[in-house]
Amino acid sequence: MFDTSKERQAMSEALARFDDEMKKVRTGRAHPDMLSGVKVEAYGQFMPINQVANITAADATLLVITPFDPSTIQAITAAIRADQSLGLNPADDGRVVRVPIPALTEERRKEIVKNASNKVEQAKVALRNIREDARKELKAAEELSEDIKKRAEKEIDDLTKEFTDKVESAFKAKSEEIMKL
């Protein structure tokens, strides 16, 4: 019998990576994960922002960043401003950085959904690659009979469809969240 647990694990990891990417997508409401891709130059190297500061959502339109070391406040502000894909304009008062989240225009919402759909396609490609690797492994397994190979291939296809459907439903939910005013 062919064990598909390895493929299920790989597809689960691909889905988790996709979910992490979707958390970074801006929806018009303040969320600390929006800044997870920002790298801050601190102590002579680039570090993720969550390693140099605490990020909280004060309300739906404001992120508050409290640096662990006040000397990094300028670097945090510069790093957020430098990330053009975010389109944010932070302000600091010497102790904390406040990042107002501007309302999204209809055009910007559509652009964000389009960018998110690219991430969907990347996730689907990753799932298809896992399926193809499993099929190659099946073809190479000479000790398995043809009917076992056919059943295993159908099981792998069903698994791929299951995870593709999960990606699609997560994207649909995120799209609705983005387009909602």
Image (cartoon, grey):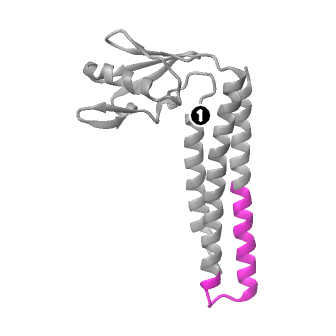
Which secondary structure lies at badge 1?
loop
Q: Is residue 23 above or below residue 80?
A: below
Residue of label 1: 25
Q: Camera-side residue: 7 or 112?
A: 112
Q: Residues within 10 Å of mark 1 (few under 14, many from 20)?
A: some
| Quarter assignment of residue 11 | bottom right
The residue positioned 62% from the left and 77% from the top of the image is: 136
At 72% from the left and 74% from the top, the residue drawn is 153
Residue drawn at x 53%, y 24% is 87
Relative height, residue 41 to residue 7 (above, below): above
Tell me where residue 174 sits by quadrant.
top right
Residue 23 at x, y percent in the picture: 57, 36
| Image height of 1 relative to 85, above or below | below
Find the magenta span and give its range. Answer: 139-163
Residue in view at x 70 percent, y 76 percent: 152
In the rendering, at what x and y percent does residue 16 appear? 57, 48
Does the magenta-highlighted stretch encompass residue 59?
no
**64 lies above or below 141:** above
